[in-house]
Amino acid sequence: MIATLTFHLHLPGCASLKEKRGSIKPLISRLHREFNVSVAEVGLNDKWSESLIACAMIGNDAAFLQAALETVRRWVEAHWRDGDVWDSKITILE
């Protein structure tokens, strides 16, 4: 099974793509390090104030994958201070 978690992030203070990368890169690194998920910016690459980030996990238990990505979602919503989480979605493919 493959599980993904996507975030639509709003970065209101960014005035350039360089500033955006400076805000997004630490988040991506922290999620990878803390939660052992694969993470990448997957959309809205040319927008200064928005980003789509995706996390992915592979496993054989849908309940475990759901719970693990729900933990990641709660952490981002509680601890990421560089912007706002406009939307998030967990998808599990069997």
Image (cartoon, rainbow, N blue to C red):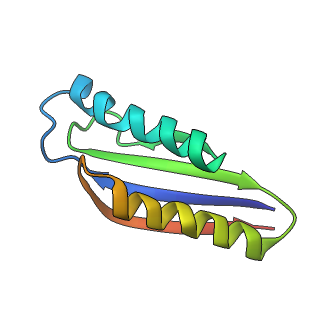
Outermost residue, right direction?
Answer: 60
Q: Is residue 72 left or right of residue 79?
A: right
Q: Is residue 35 left or right of residue 16?
A: right
Q: Nearer the viewer, residue 44 or 62?
A: 62
Image point 46% across, 67% down: which residue? 74
The quadrant in which the C terminus is found is: bottom right
Image point 53% across, 60% down: which residue? 72
Q: Quadrant of residue 86?
A: bottom left
Residue 36 placement (x, y as % from top left):
66, 45
Residue 56 placement (x, y as % from top left):
65, 51
Outermost residue, bottom direction?
Answer: 63
Q: Is residue 73 left or right of residue 78?
A: right
Image point 25% across, 23% down: which residue? 18
Above or below residue 7? Residue 43 is: above
Image point 72% across, 66% down: which residue? 65
Q: Nearer the viewer, residue 71 or 86?
A: 71
Outermost residue, top direction?
Answer: 18
Above or below residue 62? Residue 55 is: above
Q: Give the number of marks.
A: 0
Q: Is residue 28 left or right of residue 71?
A: left
Residue 53 placement (x, y as % from top left):
45, 47
Q: Nearer the viewer, residue 24 or 43?
A: 24
The quadrant in which the N terminus is found is: bottom right
